[in-house]
Image: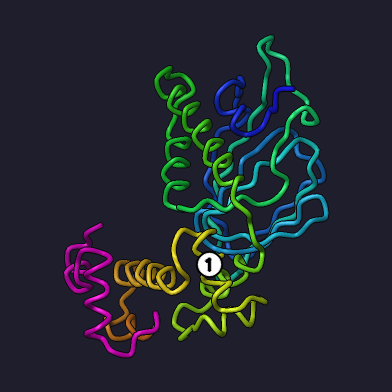
Amino acid sequence: MLVKDALWLSKHADLKITATPVLYHCEPIWSWKSNSLPDFAIWGILHGSGKIVRNKSSHSLNPGICFLLAPQDRIEAEQDPLDPLSLFVARFEILDTDGEAIPSPQLELPTGPIQTTNPASLEAIANLALAWDAENDIERSIQDHALRMLLLLIADASNATFDERVAKASAMIDSDLGRKWTLEELGERSGLSPSQLSRLFSKQYGEPPIQNLIHRRMKEAKRLVLETSLSIHEISSTVGYENQNFFERQFLKHVGFDPESLRRNRAI
């Protein structure tokens, strides 16, 4: 019997968008609830953190996580007010060759979170889906391809095991980028040994925890350089570097500009 999973959908299904794809930059008090979703939906977390309860099953929300939601799903979602979400949402119907909606019981779709190994890929594809004009054939085609790429991303990530303990460690890192995290502390708090955490984190997020921490620190430092008037010393301390010279070398290595030049030119 043919398995109609996310991979099958990306290649064969007729996907009919039911609402304009949107990107929510959620306000600090944001929460959302639906007792019965009207259609299928892809949720992609681009930034921030929070929690979602899907049909009574609770999951963490962190960058790079996707959900493929089905009609009649019951959803409650909220964010960490100190780490607001940027949330991509695409709603659609799945039709067969006769133009009839395929009932969700006939599909084998993931019921839990799908952690993509590269959050940047998720954001890039989501932006393609956002940039479209319903009256423009070319842009409608781009949007359709973007939706199918999202399904391919979900299909690929679904083959990997999602571990809530690793997601918890990731959320802890995001909650305090300036903290001197160690593998021992992250592992103890998430219920894993340091070696288990390093191995599973690399598998789930595509890089070891400490390297991931450095990338997140540099991303936050870049934002602070561009969007605030904090001194470079203050930014260095905020993201966990006591030695400003070392911070500036790390910043140049990962961002491509030194902090002062970036601020002066507002380069991107």
Image quarter where the N terminus lies is top right
Q: Nearer the viewer, residue 192 or 17?
A: 192
Q: Tag 1's secondary structure?
A: helix
Closer to the camera in the image, 33 or 120: 120
Percent x, y of residue 20: 56, 33
Vertical comparison of 152 with 234: above or below: above
For the view shown, which residue lies furthest in the top direction?
98
Q: Is residue 169 above or below residue 143?
A: below
- State whether the magenta stretch is mostly helix, strand or loop: helix
Q: Is residue 52 above or below residue 213?
A: above
Q: How is the image coloured?
A: rainbow
Question: Which image quadrant for residue 48?
Answer: bottom right
Q: Nearer the viewer, residue 186 or 16?
A: 186
> Residue 220: percent from the left, percent from the top?
39, 70
Q: Is residue 192 left or right of residue 142?
A: right
Q: Residue at x 81, y 50 (%)?
A: 55
Residue sitting at x 42%, y 34%: 131
Number of marks drawn: 1
Q: Amino acid at mark 1?
A: Arg
Magenta-colored span: 239-268
Q: Nearer the viewer, residue 84 or 113?
A: 113
Viewport quadrant of the C terminus: bottom left
What residue does disc 1 label?
199
Residue at (76, 50) in percent of width and height: 75
Residue that appears at 59% across and 27% down: 17
Counting from the top left corner in percent of width and height, residue 262 is at: 21, 66
